[in-house]
Image (cartoon, rainbow, N blue to C red):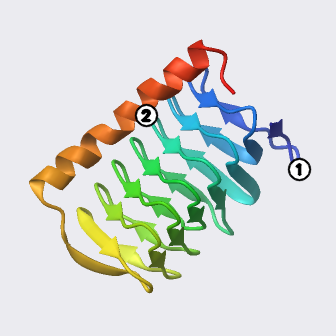
Amino acid sequence: MLKSFRGKTPKIAESAFISERAYIIGDVEIGENSNIWPGVVIRADFASIKIGSNVSVQENSVIHGDAPMVIGDNVLIGHCAMIHCQRIGNYALIGNNATLLDFAQVGNRCIIGANALVGEGMQIPDRSLVVGVPAQVKKELSEAQLKMVDHIAEHYAQLGREYKDEGGF
């Protein structure tokens, strides 16, 4: 469901797949070949949310923030993630049930592990593996991990195209 709020209407790229069971409200922009799955809520009532191309937001995740938010290209946001951060860089993987609090910033080509709690204002450098509660940078990603991050978003972009072609759900 797309809903305008305070005169702002979501802008969705023609090639994006949006489940009919997702809620997208207000000043939201979603880029080419992105896919938004059932149960996702993207609510831009306090500030804008810009989601890049080839971004996959998996079931039951929530994206909402108190400041303008930018999610880069080729990002995978896993199931049940809570995204309140200010920025997620390109080619990032946010694990299932991870929480990113207000004003946090995630660099390019990062993995945020499942169930991680990224604290308010935390700055995560490029190519970082981040896990834990509270979240900590554990190491720089290996070449194998970087290759996986680089390719996973395209897999979901293709899956989203298939669902769109089949009429969605």
| x and y percentages locating residue 139 in the rendered image | 19, 74
Dot 2 crowding, Cα within 10 Å, few <14, some 14–19, many 20+: many
Tell me the quarter of the picture where residue 68 sits: bottom right
16 or 4, nearer to the observer = 16
Vertical order, 67 against 58 (above or below): below
Give the quarter of the figure containing the C terminus.
Answer: top right
Q: Is residue 95 left or right of residue 101?
A: left
Cα separation between marks 1 and 2: 32 Å
Q: Which residue is mark 2?
A: 156
Quarter where residue 29 is shown: top right
Question: What's the amino acid at mark 2?
Answer: Tyr
138 vs 19, left or right, is left
Task: Give the image location of residue 124, x and y in percent.
Answer: 34, 72
Furthest-left residue in this view? 143
Dot 1: within a 10 Å radius of its alpha carbon, few (fewer than 14), some, or many (20 or more) residues? few
Identity, as a three-letter code, of the amino acid under mark 1: Arg
Q: Residue furthest bottom?
A: 134
Residue wearing tag 1:
6
Give the left or right position of residue 75, taking residue 127 as reference: right
Please give the count of numbered marks on the rendered protein: 2
